[in-house]
Amino acid sequence: MRKVNPLYAGQGAIFLCAILWSTSGLFIRLVDWNPFVIAGARSFIAAIFLLALRLFFPFRKPANTKTTILKSLLKDAPALTLCGIGYTMTMILFVVANKLTASANAIMLQYTAPVWAALLGWLILKERPRLEHWAAIVLVGFGMFLVFQGGFVTGSHLGDIVALLSGVLFATNSVVLRAREDKNPADIMLFSHILCALIAVPFLFLYPPVITFKSIMCLSYMGIFQIGMASALFSYGIRRVPAVQALLTSAIEPVLNPVWVLLVVGEKPELSVVAGGGIIVTAVVFSSTVSALRRHN
């Protein structure tokens, strides 16, 4: 049997990951719980799912024993916890943003992360942005202005700020992952979900959720597939695909996110949000494409 090209396998994994990520806004809207409780519950389920994968289907080869895997996780726990804080806060703030503003606003503003990653990479990793990155920053700035204008109209300015902060933290986490490229990304994501679940425990008592069949099904989907399986796919793909190609492929996430909400819930984003979001996605894809061409030349 002919083996699949690792590049294509990684690209397919990132593509499926982006599709799963894009359903977050819809299912968060369908659960009428406190956002911290939602974030913690789905991360608790995701942590169990990822730990099961880590134990029974190790990401590294040769496969370690279960005892060795647990020992390695505990040994690297301080560093993993520190690295996981950025992704943990990204997940929590994104859920909060989806409760405070429209899903389109939340995902489009979070998707400014690649631009912040370019700036942070320059400051921390000394990776200086190229001309296409600066052009993308200008376009993203204009797109953000249009999205914020829509937020002012709908009274969701606070949600827009939270979503933007989520994007900055997501970029910070990406830079940290790049700095720890010799480590397993799946371990960092596993610890992020554990930390997120622990942070949500107090809110579980402050805002006791009303458990329904719908909420259980939605949270089970989000925990296992939307962030659980997506985390596993991302961990698989990012080791086989250059970061810039992974970024280009994941551009389908912000495009699909408001589509699912529109089809199921009927929430129509403001025209300025659609225009601003289109500019943001175009800027990110343009920057990623030019960078990819530079890599191959």
Image (tube, rainbow, N blue to C red):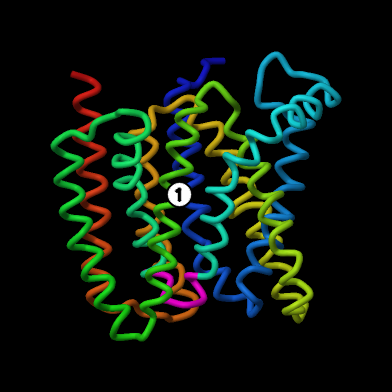
In this view, 94 is above or below 152 = above
Q: Quadrant of the C terminus?
A: top left
In screen coordinates, is 42 left or right of 178?
Answer: right
Indicate the position of residue 76 as horizontal and vertical percent values: 69, 29
Return the residue nearer the eye: 178 or 229.
178
Indicate the position of residue 146 as horizontal and vertical percent values: 22, 71
Residue at the image point whose x is 42% and y is 60% from the top: 165
Residue at the image point whose x is 29% and y is 34% from the top: 122
**Quarter-wise, where is residue 213 in the image?**
bottom right
Residue 100 within the magenta-colored segment of the rendering: yes
**Quarter-wise, where is residue 198 in the image?**
bottom right
Q: Is residue 212 visible?
A: no
Residue at the image point whose x is 35% and y is 62% from the top: 109
Indicate the position of residue 253 as horizontal and vertical percent values: 41, 54
The secondary structure that most of the magenta stretch takes on is helix
In screen coordinates, is 54 left or right of 16?
Answer: right
Residue 189 within the magenta-colored segment of the rendering: no
